[in-house]
Amino acid sequence: MPITAYSGGTSLEGQFRSSPVGGICIDMGGMNKILEIHEEDSDLVCQPGAGWMDINDTLKEKGLQLFFPLDPAPSATIGGMLSNGCSGTNAVRYGTAKAEWFLNATVVLPSGEVIKTRRRARKSSAGFDTTKLFIGAEGTLGIVTEVTIRLAPLLPTTVAVVHFPDVRKAAAAVREILNRGVGIECVELVDNEFMRATNLVHAPAPPRYPELDSLFFKLQGPTPASLAETARIVKEVVSKPEYGGSGWKLAKNDEEAADIWMDRKNAHYAGLALLPGARGWATDVCVPISKLPDLVYETKKDIKDSGLTSHIVGHVGDGNFHALLLFRDDAELAVVRDVVHRMVERAIALDGTCTGEHGVGMGKKEYLYEELGEGTVELMKAIKRTIDPLNLFNPGKLYPEEKDSKHPRP
């Protein structure tokens, strides 16, 4: 009997959708306890249904200057974040789930055996890194029942926003800023349509922002002086004539910073305001940072030529970008599918990936042979067959069909 684990329900590529043959769904949401907090070691042990926001709220309530920095969808849970290899806006500073944020996991294998991937030590050279075997496996190799996560120091932050003539100049400015080594926790590229959507959400109040391609920064530093110095350097760079940044706005206090940043975090729901009554297809790809302006430019042109309504946001600090494509009926849905396909093909051609953080699931598995090569995909499938020979855990996800069965798209 097939078994699919479910928790926060925020995955976007069909990772927790029932397989074509049905089966059992195991809801891990009730396993949501924090089991141990080790302040001296900067780590925490929890169950898979614990939400990352709940964890950070608990740490704050206890007065601990620590937090878990991976920040995908607000209702995402630790088990799903591990299983889907999550990321988020903090990735430019703290990396992704596939870095070192998950120290170990207790996992139930398809055979029924329960294993723990490693001890709680910060590092280990004892054989394979079996923790990472389950990071991004999307529940196809085992079901996570307990996780030890690494915590980071909670440093003061503030937020700024600035506007640009086009995405190319914005991305070029980010490259220089990152190379200056200043304290950047997040840097988000948003297009003019995103800014229009945000203004619509706040209507009938006057427009909050110019409707231009823009950057949202979250600046970080251990002291007010270091924050001020980072803000000075970032403003100096974006204001250079070759970048043309304008309208620099630095939050006056923590309340205004939270308000500005909420506009960025509300991207999905704001985007729906562009076409009332429509549904949204959210997708992502990722390329080397230097290739992001070309990817965004070509994708925006493709969307416009297709007659679709959309907005684009991107984690410009690591080359990951997202599009929310709106559709009202099956005819427009078909157009969206083709635009997403071309977006993926464009990213892979730029030495990128079909997904930077949403995962593979059912929606992106057809691209893995093209992206990773036959040898790598067959190795993944061999691992799956070894651990789960009866294909019981989350079948139909992640692993593509045979290479010669892929149907070409227009």
Image (cartoon, rainbow, N blue to C red):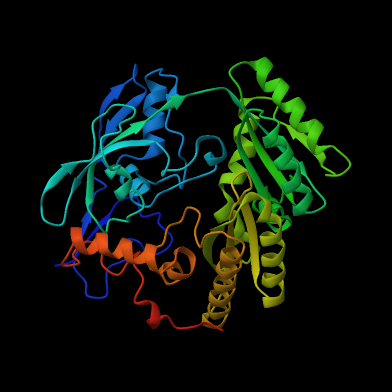
Left or right position of 144 against 210: left
Find residue 381 and report its horizontal and vertical position in percent: 29, 65
Q: Is residue 18 above or below residue 291?
A: below
Q: Is residue 190 above or below residue 385?
A: above
Residue 150 lies in quadrant:
top left
Residue 278 visible from this viewpoint: no
For the C terminus, give its image quadrant.
bottom right
Residue at 82% x, 39% y is 247
Residue 146 visible from this viewpoint: yes
Left or right position of 197 against 322: right
The image shows a total of numbered marks equal to: 0
Residue at 48% x, 70% y is 370
Residue at the right extreme of this rendering: 241
* Nearer to me, 173 or 223: 173
For the N terminus, give its image quadrant.
bottom left
Find residue 213 and report its horizontal and vertical position in percent: 75, 52
Residue 285 lies in quadrant:
bottom right
Q: Is residue 207 above or below residue 298?
A: above
Residue at the left extreme of this rendering: 112
Residue at 66% x, 18% y is 226
Find residue 395 and report its horizontal and vertical position in percent: 26, 67
Find residue 217 and report its horizontal and vertical position in percent: 66, 37
Left or right position of 8 against 96: left
Residue 37 lies in quadrant:
top left
